[in-house]
Image (tube, rainbow, N blue to C red):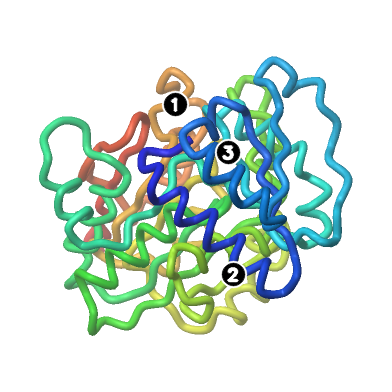
């Protein structure tokens, strides 16, 4: 279910306590193996009528219909055993998202808020983790003015990492954290790309509730909500006006597929400065095929914007890479 059962117990208790204070319940939806480590704790909360639990066998995920909405539920916590079950369980909870009730994935929690965790992850040997990368990014960006722009936030894990990394590395530097997401999942996947439209769908209430649980103040995050072909496509000037003057110190692109990633790069072009850091979460997926995904988006954008070039900075996680932006001399 998560790397730290004690933290998961704390998280479930915290959410259940919030509900109990208003007479509402917390719904836990998950695969039995994912809640095994804290099953007694969950049963105790269930006995006190603080939580309800829906357990679904992994083999039944594809056959299970969407859950009907119980308006006495104030939040849904999803416990998955892997990314496949996470997507399936998220779909099963789709009616709750549509009703504006937060649905938060607790697999893989928490996003670290402790500076020691960031330092440990950025200094240990082997493959650099997402947490370690954001710690290095916050260190690298100390001399670069501007905001943090993220395209594809899902329920906010990487934005939470960015917020806490910058907070402890640059406590006096006031930056905006701006999330661009339709919260309806991937849109624009091509036939050859190993993703499909609609997966990784969240909701803005889920995103904001997950940020709250990760101690990210709501006022610290701006959202631009809607399909990219609208918000940073045909309505691009309206969105630029909404944001006001800005520069980009860090751009995190977690769009998975080419079309939205290219729209994101087009949007940030006027905000890029010498030294801006670009991070791509799925750069090396899809057999590292240069004609697909985020790789294709970057190659096409560079061809269309010859005043820029990029230099590899760090590879991290399974398939992610970061690049330093260079503005060529006139």
- Establish if 68 lies above or below 172: above
- Residue marked by disc 1: 285
- Establish if 89 lies above or below 244: above
Q: Residue lying farthest top?
A: 59
Which of the two discs, 2 and 1, sits closer to the camera? 2
Q: Which residue is found at the position 46% from the left and 48% from the top?
A: 8
Name the one closer to the observer, 44 or 330.
44
Q: Between marks 1 and 3, how big is the CA–CA gap?
A: 25 Å
Do the numbered discs 3 and 2 sit on residues whose CB atoms are within 8 Å?
Answer: no
Name the N-terminal-most of marks 2 and 1.
Answer: 2
Quarter placement of the C terminus: bottom left
Determine the secondary structure under disc 3. strand
- Residue marked by disc 2: 223
* Residue 295 pos. (x, y %): 43, 34
* Residue 253 pos. (x, y %): 46, 49
Q: Which residue is found at the position 67% from the left and 68% from the top?
A: 20
Write down the quadrant of residue 181 in the picture: bottom right
Name the N-terminal-most of marks 1 and 3.
Answer: 3
Name the one closer to the observer, 16 or 157.
16
- Residue marked by disc 3: 79
Number of residues whose C-alpha sits closer than 10 Å to that of mark 2, classed few (under 14), some (14–19) or many (20 or more):
some
Determine the secondary structure under disc 2. strand
- In the picture, measured across the screen, residue 192 lies left or right of residue 268, that is right
- In the picture, measured across the screen, residue 14 lies left or right of residue 200, that is left
């Amino acid at each position: 279910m998560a790397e730290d059962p004690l933290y998961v117990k704390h998280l479930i208790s915290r959410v259940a306590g919030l509900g109990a204070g208003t007479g509402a319940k917390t719904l836990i939806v998950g695969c039995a193996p994912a809640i095994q480590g804290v099953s007694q704790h969950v049963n105790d909360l269930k006995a006190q009528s603080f939580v309800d639990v829906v357990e679904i066998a992994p083999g039944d995920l594809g056959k299970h219909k969407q859950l009907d909405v119980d308006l006495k539920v104030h939040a849904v916590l999803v416990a998955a055993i892997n990314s496949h079950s996470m997507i399936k369980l998220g779909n099963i909870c789709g009616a709750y998202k549509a009703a504006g009730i937060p649905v938060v994935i607790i697999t893989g929690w928490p996003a670290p808020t402790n500076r020691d965790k960031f330092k440990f992850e950025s200094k240990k040997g082997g493959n650099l983790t997402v947490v370690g990368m954001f710690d290095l990014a916050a260190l690298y960006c100390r001399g670069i003015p501007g905001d943090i722009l993220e395209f594809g936030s899902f329920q906010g894990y990487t934005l939470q990492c960015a917020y806490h990394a910058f907070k402890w590395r640059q406590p006096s530097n006031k930056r905006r954290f701006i999330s661009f997401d339709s919260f309806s999942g991937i849109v624009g996947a091509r036939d050859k790309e190993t993703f499909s439209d609609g997966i990784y769908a969240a909701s803005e209430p889920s995103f904001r509730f997950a940020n709250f649980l990760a101690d990210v103040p709501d006022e610290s995050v701006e959202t631009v909500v809607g399909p990219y072909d609208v918000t940073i496509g045909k309505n691009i000037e309206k969105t630029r006006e909404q944001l006001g003057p800005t520069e980009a110190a860090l751009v995190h692109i977690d769009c998975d597929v080419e079309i939205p990633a290219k729209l994101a790069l087009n949007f940030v072009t006027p905000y890029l400065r010498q030294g801006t850091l670009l991070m791509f979460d799925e750069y090396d997926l899809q057999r590292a095929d240069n004609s697909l995904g985020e790789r294709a988006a970057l190659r096409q954008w560079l061809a269309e914007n010859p005043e820029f070039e990029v230099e590899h900075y760090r590879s991290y996680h399974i398939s992610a890479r970061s690049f330093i932006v260079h503005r060529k001399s006139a």
